[in-house]
Amino acid sequence: MSPTLDDGALVLAEPLRARRPPPVVGDVVVARHPFRPGSVLIKRVGEIVEGRYRLVGDNPSESTDSRSLGCFGRQALLAKVVVRI
């Protein structure tokens, strides 16, 4: 998520199950990695189409995001980043 978040940056994230309404375009979220169980990604919501979230990195040339991983279902989104520490 560089330049917004550098590697190793600490963030505070609020679980989405407690949030209403759901994430919107522009929010930074924590999501389950679709191919690496136990791993998570921090990405920005770039687009929402038919209930699926297109997650993008802020540095497209260096980011692993929905361009290679596909769109994410709501259940894959764990939390919304609310502050960088």
Image: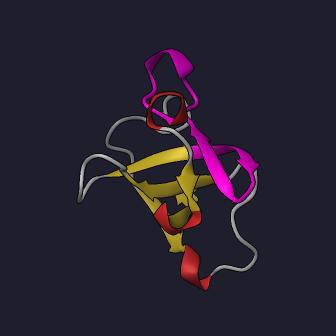
In the rendered image, is residue 85 in sight?
A: no
Is residue 48 within the magenta segment?
A: yes
Q: Which residue lies most toward the top here?
A: 61
Q: Is residue 38 left or right of residue 72?
A: left
Image height of 12 relative to 9, above or below: below
In the rendered image, is residue 67 in sight?
A: yes
Is residue 55 within the magenta segment?
A: yes
Q: Position of residue 82 (x, y in %)?
A: 59, 63
Q: Which residue lies most toward the bottom here?
A: 18
Q: Which residues are magenta?
A: 44-65
Q: Which residue lies most toward the front here?
A: 50
Image height of 37 relative to 79, above or below: above
Q: Residue at x 55, y 21 (%)?
A: 60
Q: Is residue 33 left or right of residue 47?
A: left
Q: Residue at x 46, y 26 (%)?
A: 63
Q: Residue at x 75, y 49 (%)?
A: 49
Q: Is residue 9 left or right of residue 44?
A: left
- State how many labels appear: 0
Q: Who is closer to the viewer here, 12 or 51?
A: 51
Q: Which color mode does the image show?
A: secondary structure
Place residue 52 in its image quadrant.
Answer: bottom right
Q: Who is closer to the viewer here, 30 or 51?
A: 51
Q: Position of residue 64 (x, y in %)?
A: 42, 30
Q: Residue at x 58, y 65 (%)?
A: 74
